[in-house]
Image: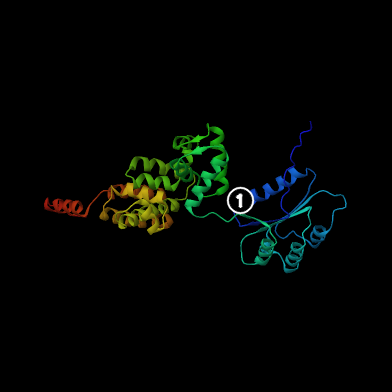
Amino acid sequence: MLIRVPQPAAPPPLVVVSGDEELLVARAVREVLAAARARDPEVEIVDRAPGELTDADMIDLGATSMFGGGRVLVVRGAAELPEDLRDALLAYVGRPLDDVTLVVVHSGAVKNRKLVDAMKKAGAKVIPAAKITRPRDRHDFAVAEIRRLGGRTTDGAIQALLDAVGGDLREIAAVCDQLVADTDGVIDEAAVGRYHRGRAETSGFAVADAIIGGDLAGGLTLLRQALEGGTAPVLITSAIAGGLRDLARVAAAGGGSKWDIAKALGMPDWKVERAQRSARGWSDAGLARAIRAVAVADAGVKGAAVDAGYALEHLLQEVARARGRSVGTEERGRAEFAGRGGRAR
């Protein structure tokens, strides 16, 4: 008895990759080419970088192959195509060949958008590849990556991963792949810490989290690691300033769930939750003092201070002193000092 093995499905004749996120674009094109090769290992592939498409390519695209077999033409940078080549592609889209797959990569810009619209109207497969900019979308991307690789994770682990790696999608995908491969597939905060502890600890955000949370000794250690690792001093003051601003915004928002506050302020819910935890140790007066100290340090690291490292150490000490002080406590201390014959500073 003969067993018929199903042949892999051929890629569609028209494909649009819409967006400018490099990882997603590369992955989309790679998947189309893999499908074409699975269908026909001898498939002819022509991949044109932006600006490389020629009139000869257009002639070949519309011509029937003398030797049979499939063909794929990848046109990158379609938003920047000159009018003559764009019009030639428009003409082809109206009469595509069955044995050819045309893949058009368009950034999503307005220019040459009519080509994308014509391909959609002709039934093209559209693969979205827009740049991911929102923290929540990066969070969802990392979760999807780990699931795609067969792993499982928690929200806390995902946030620890993003804190350590940053916002570059290629790096997030690579780290997800490494973590799934190096664990039993269950990724928690401890796993992220084991593999990426050094990177997370040397970022300006880690310094900010430590000092805003009241850990002066830890903050100073992380500060030295960050500076030794090449982190620019201005990025550290910026991270501390951002953390204090988030703290002030969340404190001013009053009560409510983290989701309600996040929606009202346009902040990620995890950032609201972090600010709510930190806010318990801060008063309005202390927060104002810390923000003033950041402004002084920011000027210092931009040239006003002789030693940027010393300016940052002094900043951390000032923020630590400011944390938890109330107006009443500060004023009472000054009055007591003055009453003993001292001079309040």
Is residue 216 placed above or below 82 in the rendered structure? above
Residue positioned 67% across, 50% down in the render:
29
304 vs 322, nearest the viewer: 322
Residue positioned 43% across, 42% down in the render:
156
Relative image position of residue 18 (x, y in whole percent): 63, 58
179 vs 119, nearest the viewer: 119
325 vs 226, nearest the viewer: 325
Q: Amino acid at mark 1?
A: Leu
The quarter of the picture where the N terminus appears is top right
Q: Is residue 104 visible?
A: yes
Relative image position of residue 194 (x, y in whole percent): 47, 34
The quarter of the picture where the C terminus appears is bottom left
**Image color mode:** rainbow
Location of mark 1 (residue): 24
- Residue 2 sits in which quadrant? top right
Residue positioned 27% across, 53% down in the render:
286
Is residue 209 placed above or below 84 in the rendered structure? above
- Residue 303 sits in which quadrant? bottom left
Disc 1 is placed on an element classified as: helix
Relative image position of residue 32 (x, y in whole percent): 69, 49
